[in-house]
Image (cartoon, rainbow, N blue to C red):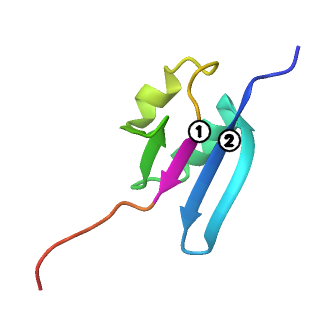
Amino acid sequence: MDEITTTVEIADKTGHTTLELTKSETLSRVAASEGSWIFAGDQLVQAEQLAQSNWDTVGTVRIVPALVGGLR
């Protein structure tokens, strides 16, 4: 039986990458992207929430750098 995959979009200092990954591959990418924001199905989630998600319905996962704002 094939593992379910989902589209994972990763934005970082090198640009934008789109991959088709399994749940375990996605969670490995998330762990390696500490400090990034993670979106699943257009909703901001924590890594633990993603790990417990139903992979049949998780939708596109986006890993993006966290935005930092403030005054100078």
Q: Residues within 10 Å of mark 1 (few under 14, many from 20)?
A: some
- Res. 7 mark: 2
Dot 1 amino acid type: Thr
Give yes or no for residue 48 being in the magenta stretch.
no
Residue 5 is situated, as x and y percent measured from the top left of the image, at 74, 31
Res. 11 image quadrant: bottom right
Give the side of residue 4 with respect to residue 57, left or right.
right
- Res. 60 mark: 1
Considering the image in quadrants, where does the C terminus appear? bottom left
Residue 45 is situated, as x and y percent measured from the top left of the image, at 39, 36
Instruction: Examine the rendered structure and indicate whether residue 15 appears above or below residue 21.
Output: below
Residue 7 is situated, as x and y percent measured from the top left of the image, at 68, 41
Res. 61 image quadrant: top right
Of the image marks 1 and 2, the number of the one nearer the N terminus: 2
Label 1 to label 2: alpha-carbon separation: 5 Å
**Which segment did they paint magenta?**
60-64
